[in-house]
Amino acid sequence: MIKVTENQQSAQFQLSAEGTAKVKSELTRYEDKMSAIIPALYIAQNENRGYISESVIKHLSQIMDIPESRINEVFKFYTMFNQKPVGRYHVQVCGTLSCHINGAPDLIDHLCKELKVKKDQITEDGKYTVSRVECLGSCGTAPMMQVNEVYYENLTKESAMNILRGLK
Amino acid sequence: METKLLSEFYHIDEYRGLAGYKAKGGYDVLAKALKMAPQAIIDEVKASGLRGRGGAGFSTGTKWSFLPKNNEPRYLLCNADEGEPGTFKDRMMMERAPHQLIEGMIISAFAIGSKKSYIYVRGEYFYAIGVLRKALEEAYAAGLLGKNILGSGFDHDMDVYSGAGAYICGEETGMISSLEGLKGQPKLKPPFPAVQGYLRKPTIVNNVETLAAVIPIIRDGAAAYKKFGTEKSTGTKFFSLSGNVNKPGNYEVPLGYSLKDMIFKLGGGLKPGRKLKAVIPGGSSAPVLTAEEAERATLDYECMAQMGTMLGSGAIIVIDDANCMVDCLGNLTHFYHHESCGQCTPCREGTGWLDKIVHSILSGKGRLADIDLLVKVADNMKGRTICALSDAAALPVLSFVQKFRPEFEYFVREGRSQVTGKTKEAVHGEMHH
């Protein structure tokens, strides 16, 4: 298991020039500037190994001119913003009812066992985190998983492992 | 047989693009609508009997008519935050026919006099969001959005907004909070969004399927639309069929269709040797039906209400006899506990207690009194909160316990499942809920 403390990873998080430009354009895109908080958190998370740290909030607050507390409450409310680091591939297996009765619990156990990792932890090589998440709206193709932005459906234990092993 | 009023061309890949959509008559109805009086469109939608397809089943035309009759700016919000467990129809609609949604939205926006709309899509739907963004670009390039649409003098801008993982944002005022850059917590009603919504301006929130259904209504007229369905449940609807069924998927049928046919004909029935045990007919918040009830149910608002449940989003979850109902309920109580926004005490605390009690039973440590305690807690969660999530968490508990009580009693008495013979820990190495 890799142990990463927040401070080691991103003591002074700064968006890239491109990321900054994106955040700035989100600020004027909607009817109200506050609507840019969620898009900005996505942009920052992508540039910070898949999670939001305190220093990310600080930086966003500065460039968006929005209080840290406002950004922080939004960050903490939504599950797609990670509060701690995740592997390069965040494997999110849907565990809600239709998937649950179609083998999701076994699938999660299997992936954790094969990858030698506990739920929500990062594998030794930093590559994977396996999480159980709530309904992903793919109930007709259960069981399924979302790996970063991509859905993989109608899985078996074997096909899921093959997909994960195939990721660079 | 399906009745493909909306999904006729969903199998064609090119239908996702503007050219392919136009080749099948796409945006013809928009051209027709832009020549109509806006009020005539609202009247037609009202006359069609169209009811909201996201879950609540409220009359769409009536909702629109709650808007103030003045020139105050107003917003149209498309609710694409599909999160009700069992529901996956909106994702399919957006992925296969993004222009259909856009066309339905422009027509609706014109009818209600809105110059700006957002499609609020749940964040996990990255692919659908990409498809929509591309379709919006195409629509702008073709003069279907922006200034003076098709030379009509009507201006309209549309954008896609991505949520970030919160079931509660599917509740219309929760969605408005989220779009405003807040926690997605619902707001007290009244005022209803039609009067005071996004940024305190009048706002109409409609589901993806509702907005798309406006197209056939305006194309063929309300009378033609009402030929599908029943007297009070008009038109066709997508049903998302999942669970223990051979051919899960989205099926478009007229309302009033037999639930039994949905499962055994369109859905191809159950695995060999399995028997139907229970059906959740309208998304996980809908009270569960026994097999016997399910076999005589029809998929319309009235029949579902008569049976003490609801049509909801049209998500049918089929449960066969290999499943333990206590375990299934534990899955749902966990979901609602996870998704409660924490704003109202009965919901924040109640969902937690429901989940704890069911999992205590599942671990083999339950007491008989826990079963009545579940009912008591659930009863106290109904009708006491800002939004319907609390009720949505209570209803499955009440119906599962009422209809499958012997299974709960067996679990408590024997300390293991009547169906699987196991406790939760013994089934899996760790608690997955």
Image (spheres, grey):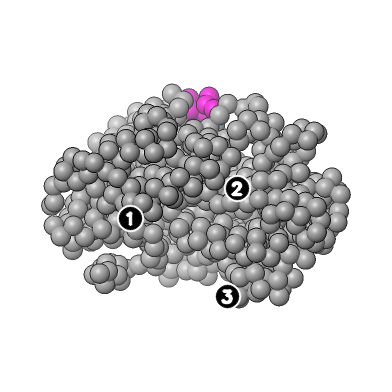
Query: Are the numbered discs 1 and 2 placed on the same chain, yes or no?
Result: no
Q: Please state which amino acid type lies under the numbered disc 3.
A: Asp
Question: What residue appears at the point 43 percent right and 53 percent down from the top-left corner?
Answer: B124
In depth, the one of B360 and B70 nearer the eye is B70
Residue B388 vs residue A58: left or right?
A: right
Label 3: state its secondary structure.
helix
Mark in front: 1 vs 2: 2
Q: Chain of mark 1?
A: A
Segment tinted magenta in the rendering: B379-386
- Residue designated by label 3: B13
- Image location of residue A74, percent across then percent down: 41, 36
Can residue B114 be seen here? The reply is: yes
Q: What secondary structure is marked by label 2?
A: strand
| Residue at (74, 34) in percent of width and height | B72
Mark 2 vs mark 3, CA separation in Å: 25 Å
Amino acid at dot 2: Tyr
Q: Residue B199: horizontal and vertical position, in percent?
A: 60, 33
Q: Magenta segment, principal secondary structure?
A: loop
- Residue B333 quadrant: top left
| Lower sequence index among marks 2 and 3 | 3
Residue B298 in sight here: no
- Mark 1–mark 2 Cα distance, whole angstroms, equals 28 Å
Is disc 1 placed on a helix, strand or loop? strand
Horizontal side of A28 relative to B156 (left or right) equals left
Tell me the subunit letter for badge 3: B
